[in-house]
């Protein structure tokens, strides 16, 4: 996108955020719009939002779903050939499992258990994240159940 178009997009994103005026439902949509964006740097944006935006917390299940789950539905970005989307999700699930194991298990881990439907390279990368999660020393029973089923 041209420099002018990029500035317009960033201005629109900031206006959307400002207009939300702290409304939780609108902020969830704001996070979801960014996670679902068709941009080459969407993963970088999602990582930044998840790690440093003051309105994002893994402690809020709806906020977590709006950013993380929406990102996993962004097929081009999530299924990046290098597996960066899978690694990001593994990182998030590792943290989320200690906060809300039900959300980690039922909402987001479910995106990795379909690894058999993908080509060999992607399947291997997805399966590696499931194995990584299963090997966590303090994995919750909720997440362990989903991950174990997914590895069968």
Image (tube, rainbow, N blue to C red):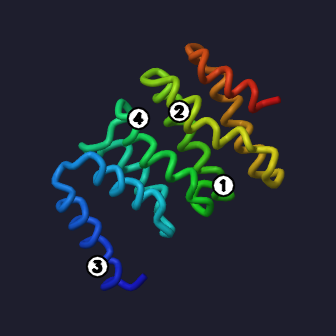
Residue 151 circle label? none
Q: What whole-number distance in Å separates the C-alpha atoms at marks 1 and 4? A: 28 Å
Q: Earlier in the sequence, mark 3 or mark 4?
A: 3
Q: Of residues 86 and 58, which is closer to you in this image?
A: 58
Q: Which residue does the image show at 30% across and 85% down from the upper left? A: 4
> Which label sits in the foreground, 1 or 2?
2
Secondary structure under badge 1?
loop
- Assess disc 3: are there few (<14), some (14-19) or many (≥20) residues with their C-alpha within 10 Å of its C-alpha: few
**Is residue 43 shown above or below 112?**
below
Q: CA distance from mark 2 to mark 4?
A: 12 Å
The quarter of the image holding the C terminus is: top right
Q: Is residue 67 left or right of residue 7?
A: right
Q: In 3D space, how far apart are the residues under numbered discs 1 and 3 (Cα atoms)?
A: 30 Å
The residue nearer to you, when weighing 130 against 21, is: 21
Dot 2 lies on which element? helix
Sequence order check, earlier mark of 2 and 4: 4
**Residue located 46% across and 65% down the image:** 37
Number of the label disc, if any, that sits on residue 82: 1
Q: Which residue is mark 3?
A: 8
Report if the CB atoms under discs 2 and 4 are less than 8 Å apart.
no
For the residue labelled by badge 3, is the local secondary structure a helix, a strand or a loop? helix
SS class of the residue under badge 4?
helix
Q: Name which quarter of the figure residue 107 lies in.
A: top right
Q: Earlier in the sequence, mark 1 or mark 2?
A: 1
Q: CA distance from mark 2 to mark 3?
A: 34 Å
Q: Mark 2 or 3 closer to N-term?
A: 3
Say which residue label 2 marks.
Answer: 93
Q: Which residue is mark 4?
A: 61
Q: Position of residue 136 (x, y in %)?
A: 60, 20
Using a 10 Å C-alpha cutoff, classify the residue at mark 1 as few (fewer than 14 neighbours), some (14 to 19) or many (20 or more): few
How far is the residue under mark 3 from the one under mark 4? 31 Å
Q: Residues within 10 Å of mark 2 (few under 14, many from 20)?
A: many
């Amino acid at each position: 996108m041209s420099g002018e178009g990029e500035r317009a997009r960033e201005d629109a994103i900031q206006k959307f955020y400002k207009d939300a005026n702290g409304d939780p439902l609108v902020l969830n949509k704001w996070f979801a719009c960014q996670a679902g964006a068709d941009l080459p740097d969407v993963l970088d944006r999602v990582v930044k939002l998840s790690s440093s935006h003051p309105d994002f917390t893994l402690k809020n299940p709806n906020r977590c779903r709006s950013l993380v789950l929406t990102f996993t539905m962004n097929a081009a970005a999530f299924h990046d050939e290098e597996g960066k989307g899978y690694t990001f999700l593994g990182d998030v699930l590792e943290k989320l499992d200690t906060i809300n194991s039900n959300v980690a298990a039922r909402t987001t881990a479910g995106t990795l258990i379909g690894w058999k439907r993908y080509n060999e390279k992607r399947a291997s990368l997805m399966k590696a994240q499931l194995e990584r999660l299963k090997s966590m020393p303090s994995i919750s029973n909720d997440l362990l159940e989903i991950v174990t089923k997914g590895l069968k």
